[in-house]
Amino acid sequence: MAKHRIFTTAFGSVYPHYVQKAERKNRTKEEVDQIICWLTGYDQAGLQQQIEQENDFETFFAQAPAYHPNSSLIKGVVCGIRVEEIEDPLMQKIRHLDKLIDELAKGKAMAKILRQ
């Protein structure tokens, strides 16, 4: 089966869209970074390195230091699909990130977004 196009898309090419989506709703780049680091275990330097190296989503998540154990608490719909029902592990991780960014843009409190 062919890989989904998003798997081979550079994370760094999508990252500015995450930031723009948040900033349009009066949220910050720092909050986007906090969410990404919480989910993946990257620190700020590691996140920046992934962006600069133009790694694709598959590599970005494969090299993630520690995918957060509370990611299983991320539920809801992204692009008409329930994230908790996605079978492909990589696609589910991508949709987890999408869902968290959506929640940020919708004004949800950071503690709730980070499942604390």
Image (cartoon, rainbow, N blue to C red):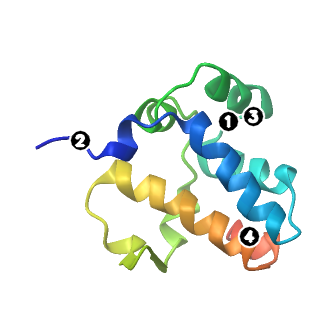
Q: Is residue 53 above or below residue 66?
A: above
Q: Earlier in the sequence, mark 1 or mark 2?
A: 2
Q: Mark 1, residues whose alpha carbon is within 10 Å: few (<14), some, or many (≥20)? A: many
Q: Mark 2, residues whose alpha carbon is within 10 Å: few (<14), some, or many (≥20)? A: few
Q: Earlier in the sequence, mark 1 or mark 4?
A: 1
Q: Position of residue 67 (x, y in %)?
A: 54, 46
Identity of the amino acid at label 2? Answer: Lys
How far is disc 1 from disc 2 in space, using C-alphas?
25 Å
Q: Quadrant of residue 28?
A: bottom right
Identity of the amino acid at label 1? Answer: Tyr
How far is disc 4 from disc 2 in space, using C-alphas?
29 Å
* The C terminus lies in quadrant: bottom right
Identify the residue under disc 1. Answer: 42
Identify the residue under disc 2. Answer: 3
Q: Secondary structure at mark 3?
A: loop
Residue found at x 39% / y 72%: 84
Residue 43: which numbered mark, if any?
3
Q: Earlier in the sequence, mark 3 or mark 2?
A: 2
Check if mark 1's residue and mark 3's residue have beta carbons within 8 Å.
yes
Identify the residue under disc 4. Answer: 104
Give the camera-side residue of 41 and 19: 19
Q: Quadrant of residue 86?
A: bottom left
